[in-house]
Structure formats: C-alpha cells, structure tokens
Amino acid sequence: MVFRSISVSIIIPVYNDETRIRDSVIRIDQKFSALDYSYEVLVVDDGSTDNSRKFVMSLKNPRVKVSGYEVNRGKGYALKMGVLKAEGDYIVFLDSGNEINIDNLENYLALLKISDIVIGSKKHLDSSVS
C-alpha cells in the first residue's frame, strides 16, 4: 500500500528500547489514524544491540518505516537521519517512551500550521517551565 499525500512524518529515534518501542509505535499509530492527517512513522534504530528494530518490523504496518545503522551515533544523529528520510510537510519528533503526552498532538499540529516550530516539554521536578 502506498500513501500518496503524507503530511506528517513522526520520527522516533530508538536505542536499546525493545521493552517499550513496539507499544509506543502502536499507540502513536492509533492516535494519528484517528486524526485527520496522512502520516508516516519513521523509527530510526541508533545502533541498538537488542531487538528494538526487529520488534518494530514485526508490526508489518505500511505506515511504519524502520531504518538504522550498526554503530550507536547518538539521538541527534538518529534524528537527523529521520529528517533526511521524512516525506511529510510537517515533522514531529517523539521519544520512544511517549514521554510527551501524545493526546496533545492535535494541538501541536494545529500550532504548526501557524508557526515554524512547536516544542513540547518534558517537565522535570527541577525545571521551571513557564
């Protein structure tokens, strides 16, 4: 199945996260399929030594694309690789553990239509977020 008009690319860098990545991708896919956007999920395996890549590939979901490389290069490099492969008009970056509440994604996407960038925050107890 080929999706002609991809408007959102969700990039998920992953490193040794086999315990959470499959469920995270399923949750993200379910959330986006309920929204009025076409989308792709790009999982970039940052040199994992566990079964992270295999677990995502087992989903056999045509909207989920898995790529990666053998040597860990860091989250920034994985994100860069995902951006280079992204086909969407908008790019969303999410961590594999869904630390950013994906229930807010629709709000973020609405803001992207009028902004160049939208940044979600993982509020930490020691952080001051205004």
Image: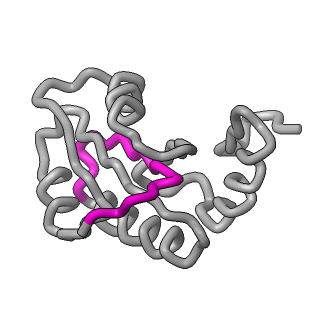
In this picture, residue 29 sits left or right of residue 21: right
Image quadrant in which the N terminus is located: bottom left
- Residue 78 lies, with reference to residue 122, above or below; the image says above
Q: In the image, what residue occupies the spot 68% across and 44% down? A: 120
Residue 71 magenta-highlighted: no
Q: Residue furthest right?
A: 130
The tally of labels here is 0
14 falls in the magenta region: yes
Residue 24's place in the image compared with 115, above or below, is: below
Residue displayed at 68% across by 63% down? 106
- Residue at position x 69%, y 38% from top? 119
Q: Position of residue 69 (x, y in %)?
A: 15, 31
Instruction: Tell me: residue 85, above or below residue 76.
Output: below
Q: What's the colour scheme?
A: one colour
- Whether residue 103 sits left or right of residue 21 in the image: it is right
Of all residues, the one furthest to the front in this rendering is: 4
The image quadrant of residue 80 is top left
Q: Position of residue 34 (x, y in %)?
A: 55, 78
Most foreground residue, 3 or 32: 3
Q: Where, by quadrant of the figure, is residue 27 drawn?
A: bottom left
Q: Position of residue 101 (x, y in %)?
A: 62, 60
* Viewer-closest of 82 and 16: 82
Q: Quadrant of the C terminus?
A: top right
Image spot of residue 47 (x, y percent): 17, 33
Which stretch did the figure color magenta? 2-18
Residue at x 38%, y 55% (from the top left corner): 41
